Image (cartoon, helix red, strand yellow):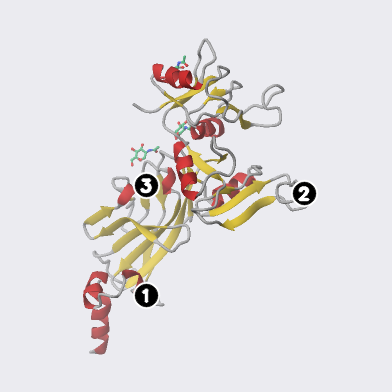
Amino acid sequence: MIPVLIGALIALTAADLNILYPNLQPSKIIYFSDSSSQLSVVAEPSKVWSRRGGNATLPCMIERDQSIPPNPKLRVKWTKLTSDFLIELKVYVVMDYLKRSYGDYQGRVHLRGSSPMDASLVITEVTLEDYGSYKCEVIDGLFDATAVVALDIEGVVFPYSPRLGRYNLNFHDAETACEDQDAVVASPEQLYDAWEDKMDWCNAGWLSDGTVQYPITNPREPCGGKNAAAGIRNYGQRDKETSHFDVFCFTSNYTGLFYYLIHPSKLTYDEAVGACQNNGSQIAKVGQMYAAWKLLGYDRCDPGWLADGSVRYPVSCPRPRCSPTGAAVRSHGFPDKKQRLYGVYCFKGPN
Ligand SMILES: *[C@@H]1O[C@H](CO)[C@@H](O)[C@H](O)[C@H]1NC(C)=O
Ligand SMILES: *[C@@H]1O[C@H](CO)[C@@H](O)[C@H](O)[C@H]1NC(C)=O
Ligand SMILES: *[C@@H]1O[C@H](CO)[C@@H](O)[C@H](O)[C@H]1NC(C)=O
């Protein structure tokens, strides 16, 4: 009698439990899983790369005891973990014939289903926000198994400070500043990868987890000390409202055309905006220049206006009179918008 009772209790769903015990939050429910483990899931490889606009397949293969008949009521639940791993956001749930995608994932996710044991998740039209860790959870009757897969996005990290000058952004301003450059706030891992790729920047910037850090390849006095080892300097978590720093943004592949406008004369900022519009385009954003430079090897020695009012040019092939010290996006800062000294970079999106 008792085992039956226990079985019945476990079979209650979270919703049932909430009716029985309204104070019991779903996160507090403990799922029982048997240590003899008749069910497991394997996520291999545990890290997947994609680009913005591309597709990604997050692997998750179910392994279960073949001697037990297949369970038609198998449930698969994909969630996204926040950077602190404390919150799970629903992405896709399959239960019987019921399939449901959530939030920004609606219409962009499905199970690969190459076999009944394949619970891999396919994400199409990958966005910058899709970056992060995902959990595949398979529930088979009383058994429950999970695996975590990371989705990494190929792209470029760049430091950003606004026209107001250095150290003027609280965390929320930083998020907006990156968004305005067709980018998102970079994660600590993305900054680390950029540092491994020789990034050296002596101004501290926000990262997506609310920490403030900066990457140093050539240790020097004003940047954490001449004798300190090369590496990431980390100020730790800062108050998101009251602390002000620069930001590290991250962007990836775009759909569209980035180009330098061939124009008979140099332009003021307002003329530059109009000249791109006259050619069916928009004045380009900082992130678009970085993506073109890093991902397409765009190279042009002409300083040009960008949408935020800065003037920059991307150099992939360093040469004596054009960024001799290395490949870089060079900046003239934020000149007087009335000066007629520069060209313009434009961007033509799809449609
Ligand atoms: C992504 O997958 C869809 C179908 O699932 C396909 O039509 C599209 O061409 C793929 N895109 C890329 C960039 O591979
Ligand atoms: C974006 O990806 C597509 C196909 O994957 C490629 O043709 C294009 O050149 C890429 N653009 C950039 C800026 O990397
Ligand atoms: C105008 O825009 C097109 C793309 O729509 C581009 O190919 C062309 O080079 C631009 N014209 C000039 C003068 O830059």
Q: Is residue 173 visible?
A: yes
Q: In this figure, which residue is indicated by the disc labeled 2?
A: 226
Residue 270: horizontal and vertical position, in percent? 46, 21
Q: Secondary structure at mark 1?
A: loop
* Distance from Cα at disc 3 to Cα at disc 2: 46 Å
Residue at far top of view: 264
Q: In the rendered view, does 117 fall on the left or right side of 98?
A: right
Camera-side mark, 3 or 2: 2
Which of the marked residues, 1 or 2, is nearer the chain's N terminus? 1
Q: Are marks 3 and 2 in contact (CB under 8 Å)?
A: no
Residue at far right of view: 227
Which of the marked residues, 1 or 3, is nearer the chain's N terminus? 1
Residue 10: horizontal and vertical position, in percent? 28, 77
User: Which residue is at a point 35% across and 76% down the rendered structure image?
Assistant: 32
At label 1, the amino acid type is Ser
Q: In this figure, which residue is indicated by the disc labeled 1?
A: 33
Q: Is residue 51 visible?
A: no
Q: Residues within 10 Å of mark 3 (few under 14, many from 20)?
A: many
Residue 92: horizontal and vertical position, in percent? 31, 55
Q: Are marks 1 and 3 in contact (CB under 8 Å)?
A: no
User: Which residue is at a point 27% across and 83% down the rendered structure image?
Assistant: 6
* Distance from Cα at disc 1 to Cα at disc 3: 29 Å
Residue sitting nearer the eye, 266 or 231: 266
Q: In this figure, which residue is indicated by the disc labeled 3?
A: 123
Q: Dividing the image into 4 quarters, which one contains the N terminus?
A: bottom left
